Image: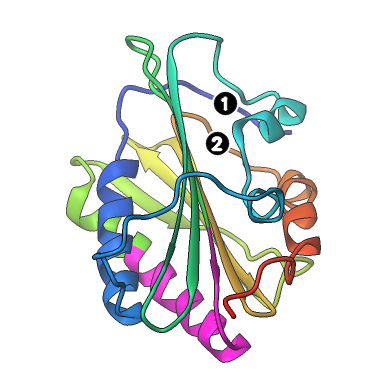
Amino acid sequence: MSRGYLVAACVIAGIVGVVGAVVGVAALSFRGLEPRTELTAAEKSLLVQADDLVAFGIVPDAGPHAESFRVKRNLDHSVELEYTYESTAAGARFVLHTEAEVNATSKDAAGSFRARVKAYQMGVRLTGKEGTRLVDQAKLPALGADTYVGQLCVGGKPAGSTVVLWQGRTAFSVQLSGLFIDDPGDWQALLAPRLANEGAVTCE
């Protein structure tokens, strides 16, 4: 069963910055174009959103929060979709950050998957507080062509989750901080609908 714990420590922002730098350089991101903040229904269907977590009982208590979408096109023609939800209630910080990168080929998607896994691991090492680790978990063989699952631990206690996977021409990632999922069946239920929509968005 999924379990959620609100914790004070949160390293999502730092990790996302490292991932953006690593993957952005690899994709030769064209920062000169303002990213779009209005996504189509097809684009949103590839992203895990806060409402999707309700079924797993891991949504934080209702309170102040910020929510945003973003999409941008890179010089290699890949399209990056992003969604971020962050609670801002004092002492109860929770962050959900999800991404879907649509590539020109499946080879590019596999390359993005590998780059993102390394970037997440590097991000925790560079930005995490002392005692913060990303502990590798068992893969999710029923999902996608390949998967990476990591549990964010602070002081030896679970404090978040990271999942990266790819299928077809799309690389997906989900990060939770402040709450976590530790049941492979829950990841399957949460991510399968996203993978089912792979191909709904192209980079052409």
Camera-side residue: 166 or 202? 202
Is residue 80 part of the magenta span, yes or no?
no
Q: Secondary structure at mark 2?
A: loop
Out of 36 and 5, give the one closest to the viewer.
Answer: 36
Residue at (55% x, 83% y) in the render = 110
Dominant SS of magenta comes to helix
Residue located 26% across and 54% down the image? 17
- Farthest residue in the front direction? 33
Residue 108 in the magenta stretch? The answer is yes
What coloring was used for the rendering?
A: rainbow
Residue 33 shows which numbered tag?
A: none
Q: Residue at x 55, y 36 (%)?
A: 180
Instruction: Pick whichever of labels 1 and 2 is earlier in the sequence.
Output: 1
Instruction: Give residue 150's position: percent from left, percent from top.
Output: 49, 55
Horizontally, residue 28 falls left or right of residue 160, namely left
Check whether the beta carbons of the residues at disc 1 and disc 2 lie within 8 A of each other.
yes
- Tell me the amino acid under the disc marked 2: Phe
Q: Quadrant of the N terminus?
A: top right
Q: Which residue is mark 2?
A: 180
Give residue 38's position: percent from left, percent from top.
52, 44
Name which residue type carries label 1.
Gly
Residue bounds of the magenta highlight: 100-119
> CA separation, marks 1 and 2?
5 Å
Label 1: few (<14), some or many (≥20) within 10 Å?
some
Res 148 → quadrant: bottom right
x, y (%) of residue 20?
Answer: 31, 62
Q: Quadrant of the C terminus?
A: bottom right
Up the image or down, 102 lies above or below 47; here it is below
Q: Is residue 128 above or below residue 54?
A: below
Q: Residue 104, image x and y in percent?
A: 56, 85
Which label number is shown at residue 4?
A: 1
For residue 101, side relative to residue 87 (left or right): right
